Amino acid sequence: MLYHKEREAETRSRVSADFFTGGKILEIIVCVKQVPGTNKVEIDPVTGTLKREGVESKMNPYDLFAVETALRLTEKYGGHVHALSMGPNQAKAVLLETVYMGAEDGTLISDRAFAGADVLSTSRTISQAIGKLAPCDLILCGKQTTDGDTAQVGAEIAEWLGIPHANNVTEITDVTGDGFTATVNLDAYVTAQHMPLPSLVCMDADVNTPRLPSYKVKKETKEDVIRTLTLADFEDADKSHYGLSGSPTQVERIFEPEKNAEKETITGTGKEQAQKLYDLLKKRKFV
Amino acid sequence: MDVLKIHQEKVTKETGEALEKICPFGAITCQNGKLDISAACRMCRMCVKKGPAGIITLEQAEDDKPKVNKDEWRGIAVFVEHRDGEIHNVTKELIGKARELAAVTGHPVYALMIGSGIEKSAESLLKYGVDKVFIYDHPELKEYLMEPYANAFEDFIRRVKPSAILVGATNIGRSLAPRVAARMRTGLTADCTKLEMKPNTDLVQIRPAFGGNIMAQIITTNNRPQFCTVRYKIFEAAKTVEEPAGEVVKMNLPEEKRKSRIRLLRTKEKPKEVDISEASVIVAVGRGLKSQADIALAKELADVLGAQLACTRPMVENGWFDPKKQIGLSGRTVNAKLIITLGVSGSVQFAAGMRNSECIVSVNSDPEAPIFDIAHYGICGDLYEIVPELIRHIKEGAADVV
């Protein structure tokens, strides 16, 4: 277990000078999330309830690139990778998966008080947990999750911590005690930026080939490699700052997407359908 | 603020099990007659609305948060995305939407532009009906750097106090908007597909939710400004006005606010690529394609139609396609004249990226596939029969003309 000594009460909205190790030992926190294995969520037309088919869940695929980046950095420069996740007890599975890939340990942030958290409230929660895991030099996140699809939590965590961030980073190189070079994809152009330590980086997708979890490590790992943090562990334990209460945005209603009213169905055998479609494309001057 | 309260004394085996079933997130468990809600709860309130009455109730907790004075926040602001003064088209789309929204409340439309030597470019926005373009024009702001840009953004908000802010969901917008929204301790809704304005100035933000076939309507009831990002090609570009009446307002950012802990080392232009966002005809493939080799069939159709080939997220995840070819919330948004989808089921996250297309033709073997809800022409059938035939017709048709 490589947990760092927890420190006494001190607000974590801004990190203090001893938040990081100065790059002497690279301590990386990688944020991962458990997402549903399927995105088949529907509104039941009869009862009006939400239906989620299948209960399997998996690690958010975008996070794997961040985990792989973190592991390669510590392999090259020395240091440790610590996994962090927020979610229900079942989310320990993705923390364990990260450990089997090579992380030292994992921390689950779990409390019913966090239910219904929006982006601001989620990022506040995670930043509080990061405060408990200090020292830390680098925080790595994936690009976005496949269930929320917002791609915003990383930048907001960095703002709560008062440290710089970059999104859509394709590569991290030249790590020294002063910082590192991040290659940033800005749509039309690419920049190389020198970022200080500590910083938060959201890795772009498909920037590496994530390794598979090791079966050997899995067999050797004990459950206590994962610990849980609840609201009571936070420096700021004011309930009203978290979950739905701490969320400026509120979901007013949920509904099924609009259906297209003017739709036409093309029927017949495959041959007939192809003929009808061709006639249609011709009529509308697409061919 | 609302919290869920469990009335244990009313829990029975039947009602407990019913509640377990109703929770779409598996957060409710009932063991030995004791009901529990875990951290998996997303506060969707299904248990309150649809569950057996009176067992889980929504309680108004003590709410001593100060109420925001919404009258102090006026204007709909658009963040101007540009490169050396060349304005990204998403900005014009957002201005168009901002004008519609502002018409409801009678608010002005603002634009915020940060850069160097941008005055002329800022003036060019006035013809789209912007009332005031606020510019932070300084040589040190020439290149995008997160910290000084966030500082300028914050300065603009504190001084101008706009009620709502629209930001393009580009890589820069998606980095800057959350940074500034968190600094203002306010809400941010990503990738809105629809925006409406309430007379009380609450911005109604609609986007796909829970990663499924569900839309959520989101509001920011007690915080200002209200922040949202919108992807390129979701809204229509603003029409020009005959007599622009707006003005460019110069703003100053103090020197210490222009400092950056991040240093720009170099920038490199990316080679221009054909972007599927710009394509007018698209053939999109999904999991109905049985093997990677079958991409050739779709490619052939795309070629005879002069179309771009695009795909769904699973096709990128299994390594068959480059991520740049992906349509959807985690890929590109397209606004094509014609899009033919082959073997695409049509998740909301995919549909959000293409439903504005003028003519949607969908081929899928599953009659229940949600893609048929948005397709203008639905073809329930086997793409392996239909596509080769269609290609043959198109080729013969072309030969006839010659």
Image: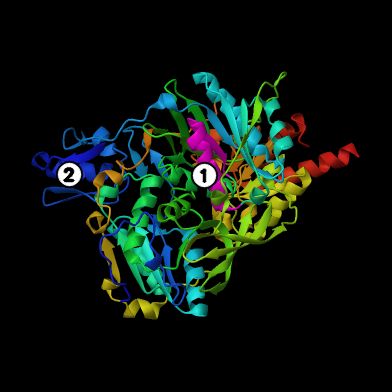
List x then y, in percent, for residue B218: 42, 34
Q: Residue B16 got which mark? A: 2
Q: Circle 1 is placed at which residue position?
A: B177
Q: Secondary structure at mark 1?
A: helix
Is B103 or B309 nearer to us in this picture? Answer: B103
In this picture, residue A141 sits left or right of residue A276: left
The amino acid beneath tag 1 is Ala
Expressed as whole percent of the image width and height from the top left, the position of residue A196 reads 52, 65
Look at the picture and state if A73 lies above or below A199. Answer: below
Residue found farthest to the front: B255
Q: Chain ID for label 2?
A: B
At label 1, counting other C-alpha atoms closer than 10 Å, the crowd grade (few under 14, some 14-19, many 20 or more) is many
Distance from label 1 to label 2 (Cα)? Answer: 43 Å
Q: Secondary structure at mark 2?
A: helix
Q: Chain of mark 1?
A: B
Q: Magenta stretch: give its range.
A: B145-169
B234 over B198 or under it: above or below: below
Task: Give the image location of residue B141, x and y in percent.
Answer: 64, 49
Taking A26 as reference, is B295 above or below it?
above
Residue B285 forms part of the magenta stretch: no
Query: Horizontal and vertical percent for residue B389?
Result: 72, 45
CB atoms at circles 1 and 2 under 8 Å apart? no
Label number found at residue B340: none
